[in-house]
């Protein structure tokens, strides 16, 4: 049994978008201040807001469409770990864009989605809070990298070691 085509499409779309956004975020961070860097930051914000919106759509789909069951041969502790890993991924898909939005607000840079829709600042300008939120945003992204590595490693283990068909549910 497979996930629905909508769930599979959202999974792979978000996987590509998140990986691209991570690459962009790490790349733009170390660039010298320039108009190019400002443009990359704007694109990063646009993509972050888009992922935030997609995460809500994905969560709504997940709540209204039961995922396929795990293979019968999968031990309960492994199933629990899979649920915990998925919960962590969902939490991070919401927490990271929100921390970025909060950080931008605190640093005094309004987020404007695709250059058209100004989003409200979530907090007042506060340099110290902005620095704390910047550290939080970075830490959450490193947590995402670790969680994604575990997710991919588990998928590959199920496919090539356990050979239990888990990965087929998302293909």
Image (spheres, rainbow, N blue to C red):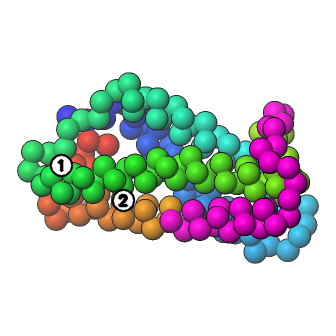
Q: Residue at x 20, y 62 (%)?
A: 160
Image coords of residue 71 (percent x, y): 14, 45
Mark 1 — residue?
165
**Secondary structure under badge 1?**
loop
Image coords of residue 155 (percent x, y): 29, 57
When the figure is inspected, residue 130 is found, relative to residue 82, above or below; the finding is below
- Total marks placed: 2
When the figure is inspected, residue 5 is found, relative to residue 127, above or below; the finding is above
Mark 2 — residue?
151
Circle 2: is it few (<14), some (14-19), or many (20+) Cα within 10 Å? Answer: some
* Quadrant housing residue 5: top left
Image coords of residue 161 (percent x, y): 16, 65
Q: Residue at x 46, y 47 (%)?
A: 90
Closer to us: 136 or 154: 136
Q: Is residue 125 magenta?
A: yes
Q: Which sits earlier in the primary sequence, circle 1 or circle 2?
A: 2
Q: Residue at x 29, y 53 (%)?
A: 82
Q: Which residue ends up furthest to the top in the rendered image?
A: 64
Image coords of residue 75 (percent x, y): 12, 55
Circle 1: is it few (<14), some (14-19), or many (20+) Cα within 10 Å? Answer: some
- Tag shown at residue 108: none
The answer to whether residue 103 is seen in the rendering is yes
Span shown in magenta: 116-143
């Amino acid at each position: 049994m497979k996930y629905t085509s909508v769930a599979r499409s959202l999974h792979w779309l978000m996987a590509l978008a998140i990986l691209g956004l991570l690459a962009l975020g790490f790349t733009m961070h170390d660039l010298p201040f320039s108009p190019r860097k400002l443009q990359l930051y704007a694109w990063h914000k646009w993509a972050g807001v888009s992922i935030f919106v997609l995460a809500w759509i994905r969560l709504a789909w997940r709540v209204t469409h039961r995922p396929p069951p795990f293979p019968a041969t999968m031990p309960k502790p492994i199933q629990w770990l899979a649920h915990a890993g998925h919960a962590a991924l969902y939490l991070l898909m919401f927490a990271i864009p929100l921390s970025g939005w909060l950080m931008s607000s605190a640093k005094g840079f309004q987020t404007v989605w695709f250059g058209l829709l100004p989003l409200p600042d979530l907090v007042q300008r506060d340099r110290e809070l902005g620095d704390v939120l910047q550290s939080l945003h970075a830490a959450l992204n490193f947590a995402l990298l670790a969680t994604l590595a575990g997710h991919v490693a588990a998928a590959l283990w199920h496919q090539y070691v356990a050979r239990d068909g888990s990965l087929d549910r998302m293909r």
